[in-house]
Amino acid sequence: MKKILFTMVFNLQFIFGFSQSQEHPYGTTLEEYNYVTIGYGVQLEQGLDMKSGYEFASLNGYGEWGASSIRLGDGSSINIKFELLKNDSKPFAERAVMVIINYEPEGLTRYLCIPNNYSSDLIWNKYFDDIKYFESNDLLALTWALSKSKAAEALFCFPENSLIRMADGSEKAIQKIAKGDTVSSYNFEMQCVVSAVVDELLVHSGKLFEISKINISTSDYLTASINDFVPPGVALEATNNHPVFTKNELKHFGDLNSDDKIYYYSNDLQKVKLCDVVSIEKNNRLEPIVYNLKLLNSDNFIVNGTIVKTK
């Protein structure tokens, strides 16, 4: 069971990651670790104020996080939920994850701190020291809660300057999109542009995201060598795992190559057409914050003219 838990923790790479041998300025500090595991419980018991500069935030924007509960054979249950410890005055705001483990009907609560991915070996060793003495039922509940998070597969997105085509034909930077906005989407069955309502703007931080870039030819011709000349077109940047619609299949952004044709909305033609990928720049920069859209009535939207899949 413990091996399973260790595997789950290392797979949740958006905020859990490989430890570092020396202390990193972005990493969870020993003081923060002790605050989550001990100090916060004392604070609640004594009615004290929150530690100055800190707050707990929802992890919903990082994946399908939420409360989980497992019922044991004797009728008791272990309930687990996650909170993100933040401090916006720090160079790296996402300080750690607090795991709240509640036992019913005893009414007992335990607090576990999962360090962020910049944390030192010292902090990560404290984390593993804390969980290695867990009872089997505790490990079972924690493993169950982590397995439901699906965090790693949720983090595909775009940098803040990516332009979203709105339903009225205008464009808006993705970071300015709000719940209730109406954006353009593509109905592949009817082969026409339709409207879709934004349910949520997903904002991901918690790590430095590798951003790749592709250039798309929007002309109807290519020269003999694309190395000599790149036809008029547009550029699109995204994380490598974002799904993009191509002529033959749905592919991850990082897997696109110069043989692929992707769907592009042409303002000049007022229709969607297939365009060539003419150049690719893998992992050309890092971004601390990226964005994605969740829509109420569609599984795709148009960003920098390209049709991409939603969360």
Image: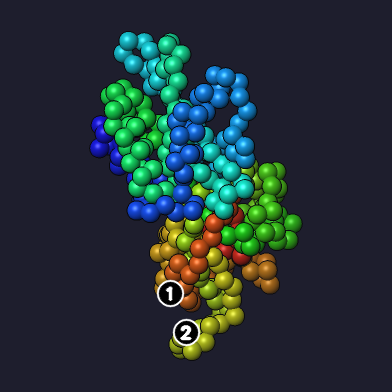
Residue at image position (38%, 54%) is 22
Closest to the observer: 201 or 28?
28
Decide if residue 160 is on the left or right side of residue 99.
Answer: right
Q: Position of residue 55 (x, y in %)?
A: 60, 36
Q: Which residue occupies the extreme front position in the image?
A: 31
Specify the amino acid type for callout 1. Ser
Residue at image position (48%, 33%) is 36
Q: Position of residue 169 (x, y in %)?
A: 72, 60
Decide if residue 252 is on the left or right side of residue 143.
Answer: right
SS for dot 2: loop
Closest to the observer: 147 or 192?
147
Q: CA–CA distance between discs 1 and 2?
A: 10 Å
Residue at image position (51%, 44%) is 95
Decide if residue 214 is on the left or right side of residue 295.
Answer: left
Residue 226 shows which numbered tag? 2
Residue located beneath label 1 in the image: 258
Q: Position of residue 209 (x, y in %)?
A: 49, 58
Residue 186 shows which numbered tag? none
Residue at image position (68%, 43%) is 179
SS for dot 1: loop
Q: Earlier in the sequence, mark 1 or mark 2?
A: 2
Decide if residue 264 is on the left or right side of residue 208.
Answer: right
Q: Position of residue 49 (x, y in %)?
A: 63, 28
Specify the amino acid type for callout 2. Ile
Q: Is residue 160 above or below residue 15?
A: below
Mark 1: few/some/many CA within 10 Å (<14, 14-19, 20+): some
Mark 2: few/some/many CA within 10 Å (<14, 14-19, 20+): few
**Quadrant placement of the N terminus:** top left
Is label 1 in contact with label 2 (beta carbons under 8 Å)? yes
Q: Is residue 243 above or below residue 220?
A: above
From where the camera sits, is residue 285 visible? yes
